Amino acid sequence: MGIRFFILPAILTFALTTALSARPVSYTGGSTVMYFSDELKESVYYHYSPSYRYSLGLEWLKDKVQNKNYAYLRYTHLLNRKNTQTSQRNLYFQSGISSEGIDRNFIGLHGDWETRRLFTSFGLKHVQTDVKDYTEEYIQLGLAPYLGDYGDLHTWILFKAKRNSLTNEWNSYPVLKLFKGNFMVELGYDENDEWDAHLMYRF
């Protein structure tokens, strides 16, 4: 049945009953649980942030490329953050070492820039495996159809384009992003009939 059968409905139900911030590093002492699903993987990821500068975590992953289940020990570091009166930008380094061996790992960069109205982000990740190494990359552009107040449900309508070196083809599709309080959900459906889902709860 897979991780999705149990985790996705539970998180969606939880979202409806709780009061989001899409940052891979939390506030000092904070924890975050995330769920990811796309054509390459399905995973549940927990991380703890000893400092607002970095986080340490564990990701349980179903690898759809290798048809294997394993875990990653992950480290994420905030390389740069710039706040102004109207915008914020962030740049992160990410890395992981597989439970199947230190030679199976990934490294990457991802960043974002946003105002209350506009949002853009990118990601670049190189994955080393025992079968075939590959690279993933994406960009997202979007806008908020309305400006909510603090504590409101916030909505973004995004356009996402992504590519991996296994197929070497760009895939583009719309994504809906919702967040309120400590919970966020991003849902897209690509032209290959695959869900692209990211759910997050911070505590």
Image (cartoon, rainbow, N blue to C red):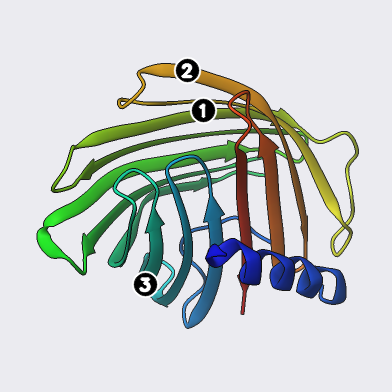
User: Is 28 or 13 nearer to us in this picture?
Assistant: 13
Residue drawn at point x = 13 percent, y = 48 percent: 130
Instruction: Tell me which amino acid carries mark 2.
Output: Trp
Q: Compared to 165, does 108 lie above or below?
A: below
| Residue corresponding to mark 1 | 139
Work out whether residue 158 can be spotted. Answer: yes
Frontmost of labels 2 and 3 is 2
Give the mark nearest the N terminus, 2 or 3.
3
Can you give x and y, in whole percent of width and height, for residue 61 in the image?
39, 62
What whole-number distance in Å separates the C-alpha atoms at marks 2 and 3?
30 Å
Mark drawn on residue 57: 3
User: Is 73 or 24 nearer to us in this picture?
Assistant: 73
Mark drawn on residue 71: none
Q: Secondary structure at mark 1?
A: strand
| Residue corresponding to mark 2 | 170
Give the mark nearest the N terminus, 3 or 1.
3
Q: Compared to 99, does 124 lie above or below?
A: above
Frontmost of labels 2 and 1 is 2
Give the mark nearest the N terminus, 2 or 1.
1
Instruction: Tell me which amino acid carries mark 1.
Output: Ile
Is 173 on the left-hand or right-hand side of 68?
A: right
Instruction: Tell me which amino acid carries mark 3.
Output: Gly
Instruction: Identify the image quadrant of the N terminus.
Output: bottom right
Is 197 on the left-hand or right-hand side of 166?
A: right
Q: Secondary structure at mark 3?
A: strand
Can you give x and y, in whole percent of width and height, for residue 196 in the image?
60, 42
Residue drawn at point x = 29 percent, y = 33 percent: 135
Crowdedness near tag 3: few (<14), some (14–19) or many (≥20) residues, C-alpha within 10 Å: some
The image quadrant that residue 188 belongs to is top right
